[in-house]
Image (cartoon, rainbow, N blue to C red):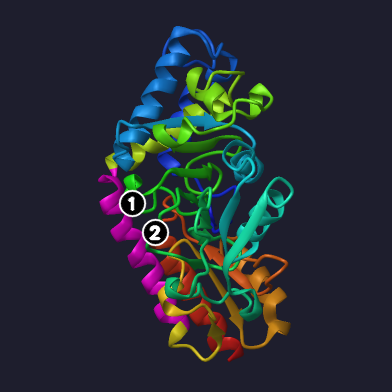
Amino acid sequence: MRKWNFSAGPAAIPEPVLREAQDEMLEWQGSGMSVMEMSHRSPDYIDIANKARQDFIDLLEIPSDYQVLFLQGGATLQFSMIPMNFGSNKIADYVLSGSWSKKAINEASKIMDINIITSSESSNFNHVPDEDSWNCSEHAAYLHYVSNETIQGNALHTPPTTKAPLIADMSSVILSEQIDVSKFSMIYAGAQKNIGPAGLTVCIIKNDFLKTASTELPDMLQYSKHADADSMFNTPPTFSWYLSGKVFTWLKDQGGLVAMGDINRLKARKLYDFIDHSDFYSNSISIENRSIMNIPFLLVNSELDSEFLHDAENAGLLNLKGHRSVGGMRASIYNATPIEAVDALINFMADFQSKHG
């Protein structure tokens, strides 16, 4: 029996997708082989890859003047590739809003000058400072921010207004709701949270911005090389690409990102409402910056944390332990986590509170 998985990543994948992949595991559609055994340059696999890319473009309504790259290395590699490609002899603006933006800043600072235009580190990243207070550079190479901090559970729900090219790490929020891609010069995301299996990284780059990328880097680190090769510069993570494509089809079947956004906001609202009306659980993130994907919460008595996690696992609620840097609990409620899972968690939390409150 499958249980409810609240992992922050690698995370839940829709069960219909897993079952379809299971049916095709040994042999894909009469080809005589598994997708994992196919050449990435074979006609069958090219069809798989192209359909996945087009479905992704359709879901996000990506304009035609953007490149969509399916790469490797996770968002972490992009922390270095972005300044290497776009930051030569320049300064870049960065928003420091949590652990992942801090990692991005640490990597970029090895390569170029960094201006931290705002930070909420002194308040444990419980909010994102208002944009009016940001200290932006006059001629920044780009402005980088993490739209949803997976660990702290804060989010910037509206893209910043900037004259500089805007870059967003959307690893834990991509495909969770509609966005206006045209506001960005680049969006990137590791797949293992809200797209599909680990191993794939998606980059969306505006053509005009891509033209400014460095051509002096090793080939593997040049975005333009990957774009010219249709993401086949080297062997891609073929199975992750294939399974992500099935997730894209599933998302279309659910009604697309408008429908998913409604569902995700409902899930988050139900869990936040329960926490806010409890004197046993708490969430410290400012209301306007609360994530709809990653919801951390604390118990009134941390000595009960181990018992909570043990009982939750016995109840079929998995991977609720908060990140080691934050403590407490965290429920990641990505697209593949249905409302029924959130209801089950709330019922468990209420029952646990009644026993220990």
Q: Is residue 167 magenta?
A: no
Q: Quadrant of the C terminus?
A: bottom right
Q: Identify residue type, mark 1.
A: Ile
| Point 34% across, 28% down: residue | 54
Tell me which segment is drawn in magenta. Answer: 254-275
Q: Of callouts 1 and 2, which one flags the residue occurring earlier in the amino acid sequence?
A: 2
Position in image of residue 49 (x %, y %): 44, 22
Position in image of residue 104 (x %, y %): 64, 53
Image position of 177 (left or right of 97):
left
Image position of 263 (left or right of 151):
left
| Point 46% across, 44% down: residue | 187
Q: Identify residue type, mark 2.
A: Pro
The crowding category of the residue bearing disc 1, from other C-alpha atoms within 10 Å (few below 14, some 14 to 19, many at least 20), is some
Q: Is residue 263 magenta?
A: yes
The residue labelled by disc 2 is 159
Q: Is residue 268 visible?
A: yes
Marks 1 and 2 close (CB-CB < 8 Å): yes
The residue labelled by disc 1 is 179
Q: Which mark is residue 7?
A: none
Q: Is residue 319 visible?
A: no
Q: Nearer the viewer, residue 109 or 201?
A: 109
